[in-house]
Amino acid sequence: MIMSSTTKIAVIQAAPSFLNKDKTIQKIIRLSVEAGRKGARLIVFPEAFLPGYPRGFTFGVHVGNRTEQGRILWQRYYENALDVNGPDLSRIGEVARKINAFISLGVVEKEGGTLFCSNFFFGPEGTLLGKHRKLKPTAAERFIWGEGDGSTLTTLDTEMGILGSLICWENYMPLARMAMYNKGIQIYIAPTADQRESWQWTMRHIAIEGRCFVLSCNQYINTDFIPEDILQLEDIKDPAGFVCRGGSVVVAPSGELLAGPLWDREGILYADLDLGAVARGKFDLDVSGHYNRPDVFKFEVAGQPPVLKIPSKSKPSEKG
């Protein structure tokens, strides 16, 4: 008899309290508790949710010149980024412990004087299990974020399956995807700021290519969520008031949509993931196994960490 078990996941499409770290952490806690009460064992937040994705910002950058006004705004962004040596990390870890769930959270992380667009993984014991730093910030993101490297191509072997993430347009890097496939990824997390219809095609393609579940999570944010002084400072204009429409989605290894896409509002997508679907999909296509030709193609990742084995948590849930 075939045994099958499912895991409930939650993909949270929401707006942060823009450039307000404390209020955004409060929202992360509230939404995580809500999803935990619904039985979610994995909760996913968007790219750069803390302290917000700065769509439309220029930070006063011109070729060969930066403005003092832009430096002041960047300072504000920096001050609201997450410091892994500060107390905020434990606040997020504590809610993961309380609801007995894994949390995948897109943050802007600071180290020294540099910011990184990162994805943090918290476990049900309340600890930070690992992180991934975006390898290649896209276009003007390079003004504000440094580059990650192969040392944070993190995958976690958990009780619900092997999970990991690539952030936004990293998912258009074929070799970055191959690195994740070679590590046996089963739950592929793709936090993003891309709100275009073409992103939906990419998510379905990756699910089919990797024979894995794909969880894509985007912010929903309109100009009502952005402080008025920033709107005036950066002259962010959109006739519909939208800064990002969302489009979060959950895709099965077959390419079938399990939840979403969710447009034009905040909300939580729930789905039950059956890892048996990954095994069934590999029968047809395994790009790191029987559908690979290592005798023809050579592949190497500099500094790649091993898959981290995360022990199951036997402690009963403390949902409340």
Image (cartoon, rainbow, N blue to C red):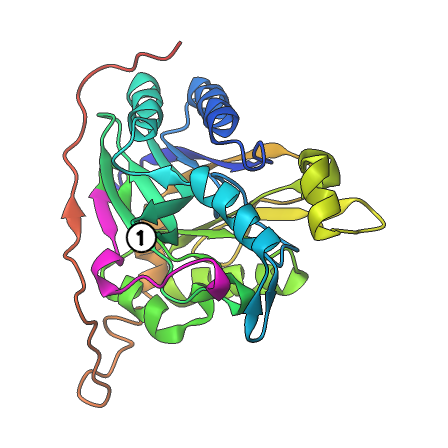
Based on the displayed image, in which of its 4 quarters is residue 298 positioned?
bottom left
Q: Nearer the viewer, residue 69 or 250?
A: 69
Quadrant of the rendered image containing residue 229 = top right
Seen as rendered, the residue at the extreme right is 239
Q: Which residue is mark 1?
A: 132
The image shows residue 17 at horizontal and vertical percentages of 58, 31
Q: What residue range appears in magenta?
A: 142-157
Is residue 75 visible from the viewing direction of this image? yes
For the C terminus, the quadrant is top left
Where disc 1 sits, the SS reads strand
Extreme bottom residue here?
296
Name the spot of residue 207 as percent of width and height, x first.
Answer: 44, 60
Q: Residue at x 43, y 35 (%)?
A: 9
The answer to whether residue 180 is above or below residue 80 is below
Is 257 above or below relative to 65? above
- Residue situated in front as seen by the camera: 194 or 156: 194
Question: Looking at the image, which residue is at 31% across and 61% down?
Answer: 148
Asked if residue 153 lies in the magenta stretch, the reply is yes
* Amino acid tagged 1: His
Q: Count neighbours of disc 1 (C-alpha within 10 A) and say few if under 14, some if 14 to 19, many if 20 or more.
A: many
Residue 233 at what x, y percent from top left? Answer: 70, 47
Question: Does the magenta-highlighted stretch encompass residue 231?
Answer: no
Q: How many marks?
A: 1
Residue in the image at 63% along x and 49% along y = 247
Counting from the top left corner in percent of width and height, residue 268 is at 56, 32
Question: Going by the image, does 5 lie left or right of 237?
Answer: left
Residue placed farthest to the front in the image?
A: 68
The image quadrant where one finds the N terminus is: top left
Residue 201 placement: quadrant:
bottom right
Residue 264 in view here: no
Q: 47 above or below 269?
A: below
